[in-house]
Image: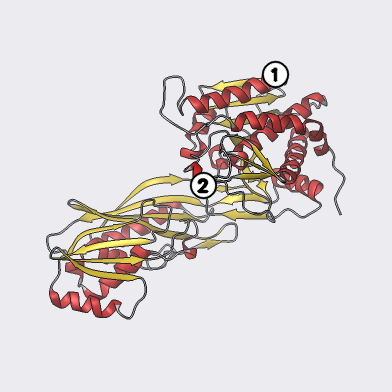
Amino acid sequence: MQSQLLFGHHIEPYFDTMIKDLETLISIPSVCSKKTPEAPFGKSCAEALDFILNTAERLGLDITNTGYYAGDARLGHGSTYIDILTHIDVVPAGDVKNWDSDPFTLTRRGEYLYGRGTADDKGAAIAALYSLKALKDAKIEGNYCLRAVFGCGEEIGSDDLDVYYGQQGYPCMGFTPDCSYGICCSEKGILRIDFAAPHTEHSVIESFQAGTAVNSVPNTACALLSCSQEKYRQLKSLIAALDGFTLEEKEGLVQISANGRSAHGAEPELGENAASKLLLLLHQIFPAEELGPLFSFAAEKIGMEYQGKSLGVMMSDKQSGPLTLNLGIASVQGATETISVDIRYPVTADKEQIITALTSAASAYQVKATEVHHMAPLYIPRESRLISCLSASYQAVTGKECNIYSTGGGTYARHAKNTVVAFGPVFPEEPSTNAHGPNERLNLDSFRKHSQICLEAMYRLFIS
């Protein structure tokens, strides 16, 4: 049975105006583009930020523009902030022939609004803005400065927030409606490592290519080999009994390819790694001196594993689950062979211990391990005031218990120094919004319900 709302229903009088403003915001093709001195993410992103900040000012809210990296509308005073993080940049529309309507024209069909950015994340940005307006009009006085923050570069790495927070200060609490309901209270650490070794003259591998992004399971891999006819016959015999391989002679060399199944690097168990399949096959035929140190290392210490057992980094915790490891890219480029892996590690784990174990395992093969990228984990305890408040807000609007979960992915929340969690706007029972694909859409009933939850949560946090 639905609980009585304390404040969330106050968004209703603004709903028609919200849709009109969303229509204007969708019409601005705010795909990150060439940097200019005035617009670090391009003119369209700056135009979208101008629109939403001008709208906020028209609504009587205070605004700040941090060099077109991000801006905010705010209510209340002081330097203790509660933030609602959204972004107004979008991914490209792609081939418009795959859309049933113009991607930058808000189009209603039935109970859905279609357009690039409706779900990710312009709808949520409008909901956050008008939640501030509802609080202001009701003359609610809170104990914090409540900020609706609008980023301009989330889709290309989120350094927009790093610049914003460097100038405007970090919050004490907050949420980002740029994920799914319920509450994502923990995000695993993200660690990307390159393993490299020289390409030796004894190697049979002339070229090797698999993967284009380290955070994706490669679905194809191809190697060009310089090997004897005997080895060629062994390979041909071996793959005859296997699925997913092709083999042919090509200009005096042997080309062998493997097919797998792609998946996000945070969930490698859902895919089938073509690079690992191919390396394991080659490892059955060629000795280490012909396969080379790097590919021997990868076959023996990574293989088809996705939890790092043979590398000595298998671990798990109750807060966020097991470490995952994805071999995302493998290549031979000139005199160097490189394999790039994406690791998502538990929130209680020690990053340096993981690196030490990986370095030790690699050095036994004369392979160098290099840290390329790191994002620290996010964890906010379930019993915290923030989680309790958001959970109660969700239940007040929906009448349902709020699921609290962990992810191996990364959200906008990571940039706020362990003070912000992902919370909505997509409901668990909702069909896909097709957020990065053609015909991206927003269900009107879901948008209304999310707007109520957003306002309810902002109200409860503001007066807490």
**Residue at the disc numbered 1:** 58
Q: Is residue 305 left or right of residue 283?
A: right
- Pick the residue in front: 140 or 240: 240
Camera sees residue 364: no
Percent position (x, y) of residue 2? 85, 51
Q: Amino acid at mark 2?
A: Asn
Q: Residue at x 65, y 25 (%)?
A: 73
Residue 369 position in % (x across, y down): 31, 53
Q: How does the figure colour the protein chain or chains?
A: secondary structure
Q: Quadrant of residue 109?
A: top right
Residue 385 drawn above or below residue 211: above
Q: Residues within 10 Å of mark 1 (few under 14, many from 20)?
A: few
Do residues under tags 1 and 2 come within 8 Å of each other at their CB atoms? no
Q: Secondary structure at mark 1?
A: helix
Residue marked by disc 2: 98
Q: Which of 448 and 286 lies nearest the eye of the viewer?
A: 448
Question: Which is closer to the viewer, label 1 or label 2?
Answer: 2
Tell me: residue 161, above or below residue 375.
above
Which labelled disc corresponds to residue 135?
none
SS under mark 2? helix
Quadrant of residue 389 within the rendered picture: top right
